[in-house]
Amino acid sequence: MSPGDLEETFIRGGVVVIIDVLRATSVLPCALASGAARVIPTDSPPNATALLATLDRESTLLCGERDGEKIEGFHLGNSPLEYVPEVVGGKTLIYCSTNGSRAMIRCQNVAEALLASFVNAGAVLERLAGMDRDIIVLCAGNHGRPSMEDTALGGLLVDGLLDADPALLPDDGALIARLVWQRWRGDVPRLLRSTSHGAYLASLGHEADLDFCSQVDLQPIVPLLRQGRIEPGVRRAQTAQAAR
Ligand code: MLT
């Protein structure tokens, strides 16, 4: 339900699905779909700025948020609507967000980690289908606490995986997440508006981001995190209905 629940040894052998619906793991599939070359997650604005000093400034952008807003001196904030091809095409993105990039950093050394949100849920389910490994769904949560939007998306994935293979053995956390998804299935826009971080983003005027992040199966891309870099992994051939 949140990164604090995880033990490093537990995640090492499996495939980890990192979720931060509002907004990190909704933003990054869109950035990669818009042609960003790679994303490097960092844990703090000073570390992001220090990393920029070691890279080519022409082809690198500082991106992310603190308290939901663009960080001073950064090129981009954390609205998926900012990550358009004209801005991010061909660029390396140094990415720093409050909860999402920290969850990514915790998974830098796992065999396989990927990013999921409602916008790429169907492509993620396709990637996970038939995996012969433990699947760990890691919700970034909100300042160390669970968040309902991440839990609901986790439940969508559990639901889809169990539909495809009823022999899977979900743990209790997975079953709780599935119940949350069953409550909100069919009303993702209202779900996002009713959570604490969703309400906070709306209070900052970011309603358009909530609408964007509530679109199921918009993107065919599954971002993969390997050795500290996120790159477009598999691109799904066509949009499917798996997650609806
Ligand atoms: C986070 O990493 O906590 C989020 O993506 C925050 C946000 O975008 O508001």
Image (cartoon, rainbow, N blue to C red):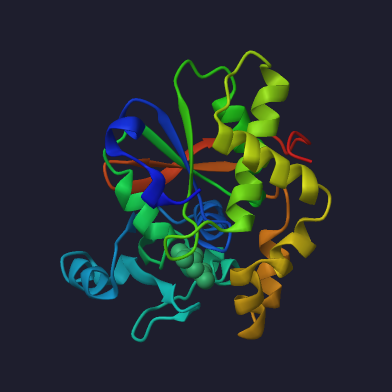
Single out the residue that lies furthest toward the front: 172
**Up/down of 233 relative to 58, above or below:** above
Count how many numbered circles sit on residues in the image: 0
The answer to whether one can see residue 153 in this image is yes
Q: Nearer the viewer, residue 158 or 76?
A: 158
Q: Nearer the viewer, residue 235 or 78?
A: 78
Q: Nearer the viewer, residue 35 or 5?
A: 5
The answer to whether one can see residue 236 in this image is no
**Up/down of 8 relative to 210, above or below:** above
Residue 197 lies, in percent from the top left, at 59, 70
Q: Nearer the viewer, residue 172 or 216?
A: 172
Q: What residue is at 31 percent from the left and 51 percent from the top? A: 105
Which image quadrant is residue 112 in?
top left
Q: What residue is at 43 percent from the left and 66 percent from the top? A: 143
Quadrant where the image shows the C terminus: top right
Q: What residue is at 79 percent from the left and 64 percent from the top? A: 190
Which image quadrant is residue 116 in?
top right
Q: What residue is at 74 percent from the left and 60 percent from the top? A: 191
Residue 177 lies, in percent from the top left, at 63, 42
Residue 212 lies, in percent from the top left, at 69, 64
Which image quadrant is residue 147 in?
bottom right
Residue 217 lies, in percent from the top left, at 71, 45
